[in-house]
Image (cartoon, rainbow, N blue to C red):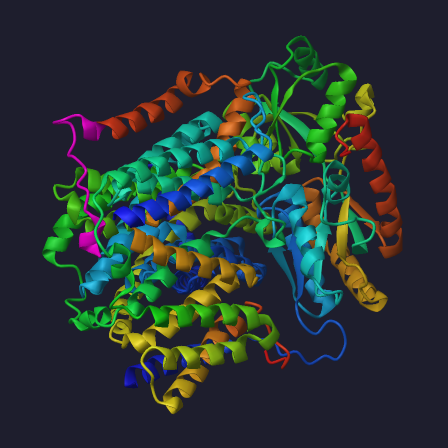
């Protein structure tokens, strides 16, 4: 008996010592407690790092902590899908919405409807995609690389962060257009892709700017980027567009809550995230990953989503990936 | 072990068959690009083979009378069942009742269930342990425990 | 001499009072979350990451790294005391550690775990310092085929993990692989065996499975016995390892450190796999393999050293290539980036202060951990003096809240209970949990790499034989499989009939 008391008291004391850091919830209006911010990717990539910084800068303006939580899987759809299935429309759970959320429903049976299940809050930015090869690869330019792939069907393997991601879809669209047969090797993220190229297990990697450190160190060669214009960081690397291939891909993304969220709450969140976006710390991290801010307010974002969904539907039809 | 092995091997065999058919339904793919069901199917086959092995060996063994009964005699299996039921119930009411209330109730039951203690001790112990756990996990580590209809927390 | 220079830089950074303080906070929190089930280093680090934004990059990384290796220290405590593995890496520690505690030798078990961790931690930091660049090149040679064959090799060590029937152990392994594959297909995001349950989309959680299989089932087995637990009132014999314990443990610690360090460099579950392999190795070369599973101190010393050495190894790909080999290193990568430091090939040149400061701080952190953990042993063994009727509700509470706090879903509690029941029945029917856990960890990696290999080779299986590292793994696996059959080469596995154990 005595022992139990002692143990209980000990635990209780520990609880009191550490309890002081608790945040009392007093404010009457939204928000009165921390907001959970779902990051639907494994920790460590460009998305994760930049969104963590955004969560931190936004906390300053929201008056409550914004807590980033990783829920990775399914090309970034598991997080939003889980939110739709579980969250209440009270604004205390929001998620990054990667483009796969609009794409998967046209590829397979999905548990969510991008046009009905979300309340879109704010649009943030897009990625810088590019294709890298190892420093000792024989191709100095994208055209040389493509020429090789064309004359050696099935010889070129390339890593992507997953099947159905924009990287995969764009590479296959390109291949279809130009009569190339190359092989996608789906990895789980940038880290795996970069390691596979460095180790020579795949020939190339198509990925978001997580390859930047290795490119800077001269271990990898960046052949091409997929943006509208050349990147600030690598002004010597051409874009697919200027090479005459007519492809621009950057997978723009924003933040959404679940459907039926009170417009007032949406406005509070939007205003806080907007200020968080303008914070120099966030701007700096975007620069690091060569990502361009691409702000849209709640209404414009919702409209934009309709366009994106149409686009995805068409693309999937074109590629023959659409579900019956 | 004869009877036990027969029972368990049949269980795993059924499981293996289920996994195999599930894997088959998931698309085996080709060797060039193995599909989602590839691994399930083959591991399922291996499982069936292994359980068949256990089954055959068990059939060769000589039976021991009352082998299954021994497993459950002389022990307090009713206590085990009651605790399991309590735990399942706990999981069921965890969110609606909230962490604090449901945990106090569970602990009181557990303190009383196996070797009954005095009510006062059980209740006090339950409250103290629950609050301590709440302090460490919720207040300090910020683990979002459910508040329940009382809205405590 | 260059190295001495760098060490000088490192010490001048790590010994700054502010950094010492952050180091201590890190290892302290690490020990705590290591002991608490459920909330692991990942949870604690993401929780504390924001608080480091205002600190200098050195201080932030030193603290976060401290949480990581500190948690590995603490991880063995609940395994030894109450058979609850807080994470997969300490499942093996349950096998002999819990038995030791049952015999009143919790003190030596915890002690050897702490000393082994300290020695292994220190050795792996030495390795990190001296061997980082060449080893990072070596790690890159592991592509999908090499991983697949390594996983096959990992599975063959089951032979040494199982006590009873081999075919039962293999059935458990097969089941473990399947269990690990439930959820979205890692290649095409197709739901597999999710039975329409949203919660299964993410797969079955490792923590609920191991805590159910080991922690909950052990409680159930104890409760049904009227007398069994009273035996435990045997005196706690000694708090520290004896001279004999030390003699038995020196070899395992050394081998475990080596294994852990090298396997830690490779992506995936380096710490988990190395702890399992270390156990297998010790059992394989032991003169008394039958003692394993009944409280052999080698079975604690080896695996505990291995999983701590793995933490040092894991830093190599991150710091030299910028490639995080596991989730925790990915989080550290994020922390570096937030503070404006880019880990990778240029880091040693661009930020020598941080690079060497962090490494040296790990030396200091390891010493702090030893000083912190040894006195704790006296407190921990007191737990075993608590009467079981009072202890078991607290153990269950510990499991319930720990499991819930990982993902905050009630579903995980159900999973834990299901596996608690399963573990209970498994014991009755003569099955063991360890092979299931090993296969559960290896399964997804195995499948993913098998499929990637076949995609790369376009269906040609020779990819596993023509690449030297892959072939070497397969040959070693084959040798392990047949060596017990060749007289004179290996000792025959001793099968202990389960009836006697029960």
Horizontally, is C243 left or right of C413 in the view? Answer: left
Quadrant location, the C terminus of chain C: bottom left
Residue sitting at x 20%, y 49%? C298
Residue sitting at x 72%, y 24%? A172
Q: Residue C377 location in percent, x, y? A: 26, 67
Horizontally, is B107 left or right of C495 in the view? Answer: right
The question of residue C485 being in magenta is answered with yes
Q: Residue B107 location in percent, x, y? A: 43, 78
Please, what is the dominant secondary structure of the magenta stretch?
A: loop
How many marks on residues? Answer: 0
Task: Please tell me which residue lies in front, B45 or C185.
Answer: B45
Q: Is residue B141 visible?
A: no
Extreme bottom residue here? B120
Q: Which residues are magenta?
A: C483-502
Q: Residue C207 location in percent, x, y? A: 45, 55
Q: Is residue C459 above or below residue C398?
A: above
């Amino acid at each position: 008996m005595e022992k139990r008391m002692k143990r209980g008291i000990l635990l209780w004391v520990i609880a009191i010592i550490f309890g002081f850091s608790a945040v009392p919830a007093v404010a009457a209006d939204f928000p009165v407690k921390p907001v959970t911010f779902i990051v639907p990717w494994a920790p460590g990539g460009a998305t994760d790092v930049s969104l963590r910084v955004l969560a931190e800068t936004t906390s300053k303006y929201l008056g409550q902590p914004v807590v980033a939580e990783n829920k990775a899987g399914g090309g970034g759809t598991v997080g939003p899908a889980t939110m739709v299935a579980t969250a209440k429309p009270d604004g205390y759970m929001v998620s990054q919405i990667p483009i796969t959320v609009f794409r998967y429903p046209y590829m397979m049976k999905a548990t969510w409807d991008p046009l009905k299940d979300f309340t879109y809050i704010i649009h943030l930015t897009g990625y810088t995609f590019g294709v890298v090869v190892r420093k000792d690869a024989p191709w100095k330019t994208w055209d040389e690389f493509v020429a090789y792939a064309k004359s050696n069907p099935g010889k070129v393997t390339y890593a992507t962060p997953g099947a159905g991601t924009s990287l995969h879809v764009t590479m296959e669209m390109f291949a279809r257009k130009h009569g190339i047969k190359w092989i996608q090797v789906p990895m789980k993220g940038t880290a795996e892709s970069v390691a596979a190229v460095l180790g020579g297990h795949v020939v190339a990697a198509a990925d978001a700017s997580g390859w930047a450190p290795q490119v800077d160190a001269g271990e990898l060669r960046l052949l091409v980027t997929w943006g509208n214009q050349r990147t600030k960081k690598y002004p010597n690397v051409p874009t697919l567009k200027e090479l005459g291939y007519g492809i621009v891909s950057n997978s723009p993304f924003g933040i959404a809550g679940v459907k039926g969220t009170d417009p007032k709450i949406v406005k509070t969140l939007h205003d806080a995230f907007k200020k968080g976006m303008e914070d120099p710390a966030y701007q700096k991290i975007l620069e690091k990953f060569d990502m361009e801010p691409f702000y849209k307010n709640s209404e414009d974002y919702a409209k934009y989503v309709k366009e994106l969904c149409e686009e995805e539907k068409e693309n999937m039809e074109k590629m023959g990936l659409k579900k019956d | 072990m004869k009877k036990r092995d027969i029972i368990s091997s049949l269980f795993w065999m059924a499981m293996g068959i289920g996994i195999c058919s599930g894997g088959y339904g998931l698309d085996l793919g080709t060797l060039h690009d193995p599909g989602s069901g590839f691994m399930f199917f083959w591991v399922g086959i291996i499982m069936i083979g292994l359980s068949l092995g256990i089954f055959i060996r068990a059939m060769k063994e000589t039976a021991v009378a009352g082998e299954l009964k021994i497993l459950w005699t002389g022990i307090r299996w009713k206590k085990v069942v009651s605790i399991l039921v309590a735990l399942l119930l706990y999981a069921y009411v965890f969110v609606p009742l909230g962490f604090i209330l449901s945990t106090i109730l569970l602990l009181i039951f557990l303190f009383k269930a196996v070797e009954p203690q005095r009510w006062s001790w059980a209740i006090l112990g339950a409250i103290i342990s629950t609050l301590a756990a709440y302090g460490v996990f919720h207040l300090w580590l910020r683990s979002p425990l459910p508040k329940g209809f009382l809205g405590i927390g | 001499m260059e190295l001495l220079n760098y060490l000088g830089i490192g010490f001048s950074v790590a010994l700054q009072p502010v950094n010492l303080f952050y180091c201590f906070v890190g290892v302290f929190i690490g020990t705590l979350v290591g002991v608490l089930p459920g909330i692991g280093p990942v949870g604690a680090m993401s929780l504390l990451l924001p608080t480091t934004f205002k600190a200098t990059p050195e201080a932030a990384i030193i603290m976060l790294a401290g949480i990581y290796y500190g948690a590995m220290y603490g991880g063995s405590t609940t395994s030894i005391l109450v058979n609850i593995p807080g994470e997969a890496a300490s499942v093996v520690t349950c096998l002999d550690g819990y038995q030791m505690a049952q015999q009143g030798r919790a003190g030596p078990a915890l002690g050897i775990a702490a000393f082994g961790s300290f020695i292994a931690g220190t050795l792996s930091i030495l390795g990190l310092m001296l061997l980082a660049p060449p080893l990072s090149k070596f790690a890159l040679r592991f592509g999908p085929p090499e991983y697949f064959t390594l996983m096959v090799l990992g599975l063959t060590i089951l032979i040494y993990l199982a006590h009873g029937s081999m075919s039962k152990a293999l059935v458990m392994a097969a089941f473990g692989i399947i269990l690990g594959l439930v959820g979205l297909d890692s290649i095409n995001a197709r739901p597999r065996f999710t039975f329409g349950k949203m919660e299964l989309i993410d797969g079955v959680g490792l923590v609920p499975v191991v805590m159910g299989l080991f922690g909950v089932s052990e409680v159930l087995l104890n409760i049904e016995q009227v007398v069994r637990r009273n035996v435990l009132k045997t005196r706690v014999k000694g708090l520290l390892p004896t001279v004999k314990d030390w003699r038995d443990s020196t070899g395992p610690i050394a081998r475990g450190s080596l294994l852990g360090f090298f396997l830690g460099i490779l992506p995936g579950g380096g710490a988990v796999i190395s702890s399992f392999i270390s156990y297998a190795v010790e059992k394989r070369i032991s003169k008394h393999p039958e003692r394993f599973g009944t409280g052999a101190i080698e079975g604690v010393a080896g695996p505990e050293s291995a999983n701590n050495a793995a933490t040092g190894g894991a830093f190599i790909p991150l710091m030299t290539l910028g490639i995080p080999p596991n989730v925790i290193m990915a989080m550290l990568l994020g922390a570096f980036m937030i503070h404006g430091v880019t880990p990778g090939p240029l880091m040693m040149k661009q930020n020598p202060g941080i690079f060497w400061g962090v490494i040296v701080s790990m030396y200091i952190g390891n010493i702090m951990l030893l000083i912190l953990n040894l006195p704790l042993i006296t407190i921990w063994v007191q737990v075993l003096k608590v009467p079981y009727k009072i202890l078991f509700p607290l153990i269950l509470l510990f499991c319930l809240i720990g499991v819930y706090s990982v993902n905050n879903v009630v579903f995980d509690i159900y999973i834990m209970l299901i596996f608690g029941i399963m573990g209970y029945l498994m014991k009755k029917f003569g099955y063991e949990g360890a092979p299931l856990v090993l296969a559960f960890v290896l399964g997804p990696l195995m499948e993913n790499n098998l499929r990637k290999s076949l995609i790369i080779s376009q269906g040609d299986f020779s990819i596993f034989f023509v690449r030297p590292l892959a072939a070497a793994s397969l040959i070693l696996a084959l040798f392990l499989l047949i060596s017990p059959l060749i007289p004179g080469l290996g000792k025959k596995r001793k099968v202990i009939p389960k009836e006697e154990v029960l």
